Amino acid sequence: MTQPLIATASEGIARLPRVALVGVHGFGERHLENLGRLSAEGALQLVAVADPQPPSDGTLGPEIAVFASLDELLGAGTAPDVVIVSTPIQTHAPLALAALKAGANVYLEKPPVASMAQYQDVMAAAASAGRLVQVGFQSLGSEALPAIESLVESGEIGEVRGISATGLWLRSKSYFKRSRWAGKRSLNGTDVVDGVATNALAHAVATGLRLAGARTVADIEAVDTDLYRANDTESDDTSVVRVLTTDGTVLTCALTLCAAVQSPPTVTVYGTLGQVTLFYTEDRLEITTPAGIRTENFGRTDLLENLLGAGSEADLLSPLSGSGAYVSVLEAIRTADSPRQIGADFVTWEGEGDAAHPVVLGIDSLIRRAALGQATFAELGAPWTSSGGPSLDIDGTPVASLQDGSHIRSTSSPRPYLHPVRTLSGTVVTDHVPEDHVWHLGAGVALQDVDGINFWGGRTYTRDAGAYVWRKDHGRIVTESAEHSDGQRREQLSWLGPDGAAVLREQREWRWAAVGNSAWKLTLDFTLEPATGRTVLLGSPGSNGRAQGGYGGFFWRLPKVGDATIWTPDARGEDAVHGSVAPWLAWSGTFDAGTSGAAHVTGDPGLGHPATLVFLASPQAPDPWFVRHSGYPGVGLSLAWDAPVATEPGRPVQRTVTVIIADGFLATQDIEQLITTLGESA
């Protein structure tokens, strides 16, 4: 049974808890300040410190003993009630074990241990000794955490859809020279596991896990790691760690030490009606609901004070037993492949000498997109990662990559799509998982209403609500088989409902070929037929009552485009072409390589490149054009503009769309000539 920390002397006079600090430099200096405060308040007695490098003269009072090691401190008979361990990561477990064996309670700095095996050893030792171990995740002492839990329970932000933890910090070369273990995964064969998620921004991970309800090892179902480094280190400095809890909650931690400007790290809980963001270093909440945005500030309980006043583990705000989920994440990082180096083309250095720090190209946007889309950097196709998927090549030049979509979050309706699609010179002309609509996925086929199932992603527009609402109605499209050859790919796809039952069968064919030296054409032919043996209705927000919102069917999400011009043979501009029926629609402008990822091909980050896309209407039906520019850049051919379309057994719905992807700016005359050429060669 755990003994109270405020002991009673034999004569019945209460004495102060005796505290020893191991490690007085680095973060240990903050502990010294806090110990001085609490000592002055009469809450404890600092009796000893231990460090191979003793504190400078005058730092401590003469009544405080100084030792070179914890072993010497314990051997001298100081008998501390609490030992604070603020030392290099690889020493945490052995020092904690020694303190527990001596009968002390332990305050263990983060990360508490360097492996799951060490965690289990310390847990067993604490149980055997009947002692308490508090872990120094100070953010877990924030009064904002129970406030968030109460807010979620109240339903004010609706049902939880996911949680993200984000950190945009910058660290200079000197940060990785502060000690022998800094930036190391191991040191002389001993695990260290220093890194952005395990040390520098570990509070983001730990706080996210707490809000996800994950405390123990058993609370973690799976951990995906995507680890990179811009610095000359062993450890990761730019990573995404995605955690799936056993209750199905997804926590996405997108973190970097290579930002251009440091900003406060956050943990956000996303709901169906709103969201709440915790700026955990400030104990500040930003709450977004249909009623508006409000800010609330909270206090924080000091974790050492919490430990001193604890009668049992249940009283601790950050017990070692509650760090099991965090250690599961650390273990996944420890056992993952070594972080991959981010290429020099995608890193700029700011500052001089040891004050210099790296900035990864586009990292701010990538962090936000990873958090919103529950996606890794590799899944986002960050230019410094290697993305898989079959490639569409023309004369040995890759012009598009096929993504199977299996990694896409469920509320974005996972589905196959093309991204990136490039011009022959390498300019990227598609986007996916953008910040504004993370369910927009390159070029492909998507519908928001298939017999009431959302195969588009995001919120669903319903006639009853007269608005977009989050519903658990998302389906997914999976590839059953594929035949890929030079210039052609044929696929058999199944459209599956939330219950996994097939709703539609799709035959999809992609064809691609050069059109001269500076352009190529991409043709998509798809056929939709019921998988149920009965008629299936294909609808859209437009068919459900949203005026001018009839998107669905073929859709192409563009990246950022400067000086965009959008026109058809008879109209010009977004408002004029949207909802019109025309044989073709063209979009030209300057595509921003810095945000679209074209720098991956061109090696010319941030420099825009002119390109023109020409979309040819389907010959099977006069589908209206769906066009967006002011809100986001996108083009589609609307399968169900203002009324649903039926696909019946034996009478499938078929559409064919051809897109000409050209470098440079094309005029109407150029387009007409190209179309004529295509017609002659068909």
Image (cartoon, rainbow, N blue to C red):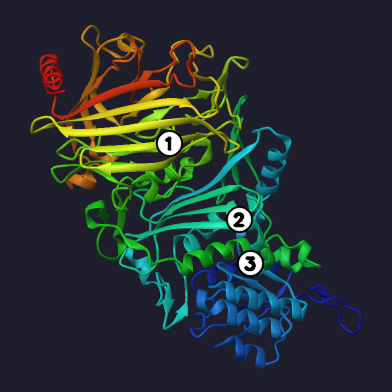
Quadrant in which the C terminus is drawn: top left
At 57% from the left edge and 52% from the top edge, which residue is drawn?
244
Q: Earlier in the sequence, mark 1 or mark 3?
A: 3
Q: Which mark is residue 139?
A: 2
Position of residue 52 relative to residue 245, above or below, is below
The spot of residue 475 in percent (x, y) is 53, 34
Q: Does the rendering let one see residue 216? A: no
Please give the residue where the numbered disc 3 appears in the rendered image: 135
CA gap, disc 2 and disc 1: 47 Å
Q: Amino acid at mark 1?
A: Leu
CA gap, disc 2 and disc 3: 11 Å
Label 1: few (<14), some or many (≥20) within 10 Å? many
At 48% from the left edge and 64% from the top edge, which residue is drawn?
333
Position of residue 157 relative to residue 335, above or below, is above
Q: Amino acid at mark 3?
A: Val
CA gap, disc 1 and disc 3: 50 Å
Q: Residue 434's quadrant in the figure?
A: top left
Position of residue 17 relative to residue 533, above or below, is below
Q: Which label lies toward us, 1 or 3?
A: 1
The spot of residue 287 in percent (x, y) is 60, 35
Label 2: few (<14), some or many (≥20) within 10 Å? many
Please give the residue where the numbered disc 1 appears in the rendered image: 493
Q: Secondary structure at mark 1?
A: strand
Q: Does the rendering let one see residue 285? A: yes
Label 3: few (<14), some or many (≥20) within 10 Å? many
Q: Amino acid at mark 2?
A: Ser
Q: Is residue 146 left or right of residue 189?
A: right
Q: Does the residue at mark 2 contact the one at mark 3 (Cβ under 8 Å)?
A: no
At 53% from the left edge and 28% from the top edge, which residue is drawn?
454
